[in-house]
Amino acid sequence: MKLTFLVDNNALVGSQYLAEAGLSMFIEADGQRVLFDTGYSDAFLVNARRKGVDLLRLDWIALSHGHFDHTWGLGMLLRQYCESGLRDLPRANLLAHPKAVETKRHRGIMEFGPLLSRDKLASYFDLKLTTEPTWLTDSLVGLGEIERTMDFETPATLGERLENGEFVPDDLPDDTALTYVTDTGLVVIAGCAHTGICNTVEQAKKVTGVDRVRAVLGGFHLQKAGPERLGPTADYLAALDLEGLWCCHCTDLAAKIALAAQCPVREVGSGLSLEF
């Protein structure tokens, strides 16, 4: 598997890639081309061109959850489709939790979720909206709705989601992740890990039946986290004996420092490519 961070909050020193408060990755695995999240703007498209990545011919688009910093780039991708003038473009599968494509709002922001409706998405992509784990390739799986088992990763709400015509507190049931199975263990690929990065890893083990974890990467949603959350999280991840921990996007500096005290934290930025 080859994974490229198309956009992240950070741009590596000396690189020519754009950064923004969003996340998008491009994954090549088992002959399949997968776009995981699309960031906030067209920055992931600009970086893809600079990286030589063709996003017009995708097999899968997978969404980690329905927030704007992971989904608004979808509109930019559709614009690129339309402006390409090509009529033989394949219809990619779009994998997401059903609640990831619903309206959300937060702190007065009129739309905190995706800008494109379910019907609009269905006119361009084959929708695979499910709460169940879904295999994209023989080795790459979407984890479905993540079970929350860790007592230190307590459920928290962020804004509201529209449900049955009414807004309700959003505890992000749509948060999910991908996992790649290698001969020597799992590579867990998170978007924001609103359900908790440790819960996410446990879900990956449960879905795949593999206990060994090689690497964990993506957003960990550790912002202004207290010691009661950071301590157990660092202990759990350290016990995995990882090859690398590529935490980014919604993981703040204090969290990275705390994790780096026990774990092999690696630097992440737009344009970074990894192979497993």
Image (cartoon, rainbow, N blue to C red):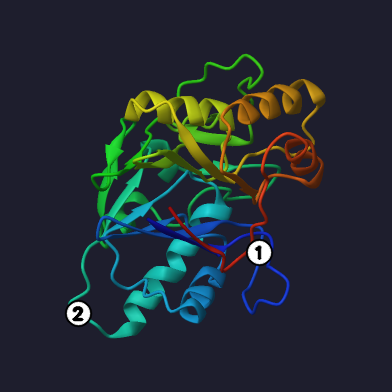
Dot in front, 1 or 2: 1
Residue pointed to by mark 1: 20
Residue 198 position within the rendered picture, expressed as x and y whole percent measured from the top left:
57, 27
Q: Is residue 175 visible?
A: no
Observer-nearest residue: 246 or 8? 246
Asked if residue 164 is positioned above or below residue 65 in the image, the reply reads above
- Residue 28 in percent (x, y) is at 35, 60
**Looking at this view, is 110 or 67 the one in front?**
67
Q: Secondary structure at mark 1?
A: loop
Compute the Cα span from label 1 to label 2. 31 Å
Residue type of the residue flagged with mark 2: Arg
Image quarter of the N terminus: bottom left
Residue shown at the point (81%, 25%) measured from the top left: 227
- Left or right of 18 on screen, residue 50: left
Q: Please provide percent x and percent y for residue 127.
A: 26, 49
- Give SS at disc 2: loop
Rendered view: 187 above or below 89:
above
Instruction: Tell whether 228 sits left or right of 76.
Output: right
The residue drawn where x is 65% and y is 67% is 19
Using a 10 Å C-alpha cutoff, classify the residue at mark 1 as few (fewer than 14 neighbours), some (14 to 19) or many (20 or more).
some
Q: Residue furthest bottom?
A: 85
Residue 87, which numbered label?
A: 2
First reached walking from the N terminus: tag 1 or tag 2:
1
Q: Amino acid at mark 1?
A: Glu
The reply to whether residue 254 is in sight is yes
Up-down relation of residue 205 to residue 67 (above or below): above
Q: Viewed as shown, does residue 67 lie left or right of 121?
A: right
* Residue 99 sits in quarter: top left
Q: Could you say which is closer to the camera, residue 97 or residue 135?
A: 135
| Image position, residue 96 (x, y; %) | 37, 43
